Amino acid sequence: MTTIDTSSVLIGNSFPLSLIRRSVRIEPISEVDLIATIKGGQIASFWGHSNTLAAVNGWLGLDLTPKSERPVLCLSENKLPQLDGVEYQACFIFSPDYRPGFRPAIGAEVDAANIIGWQILKIVWE
């Protein structure tokens, strides 16, 4: 049996839509709102691209390095995202803002120099 962790925040650089099996609400939030949400808590990171990790860590001022390299999310029996045996009702996803005119090549890693900022989406499972 899994438990819902309310003392840590699930964060990643993308979320597989194939793992959404119940209603969700998705909304953009600010960096300030994210910092307020995670203040005093733990970060459970499933960041999958090491090339952008340093860029987001520098921008946010926090370390989003996951405990293992390219951790795998799965679904709990409650159809919530689960990482390392713990399920979450919310997840924060970071999407890069690229420099003007830049378009990533298909299948290629994006160099951090092409990222000028980040957008944060909050996904809440209802």
Image (tube, rainbow, N blue to C red):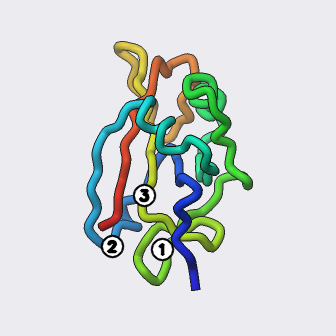
| Closer to us: 121 or 36 | 36
**Callout 3 secondary element:** strand
Residue 90's tag is: 3
Q: Residue furthest bottom?
A: 1
Rendered position, 61 above or below 34: above
> Label 2 amino acid?
Arg
x 49%, y 77%: residue: 76
Q: CA distance from mark 1 to mark 3?
A: 13 Å
Q: CA distance from mark 2 to mark 3?
A: 14 Å
Which badge, 1 or 3, comes first in the chain's sequence? 1
The percent position of residue 119, horizontal first and vertical second, equals 39, 32
Q: Are marks 2 and 1 in contact (CB under 8 Å)?
A: yes
Measured as percent of width and height from the top left, residue 31 is found at 44, 30
How many C-alpha atoms fall within 10 Å of the one at disc 2: few (<14), some, or many (≥20)?
few
What number is the disc on residue 101? none
Q: Which residue is mark 2?
A: 21
On screen, residue 73 above or below 47: below
Q: Residue 71 or 107: which is nearer the viewer?
A: 71
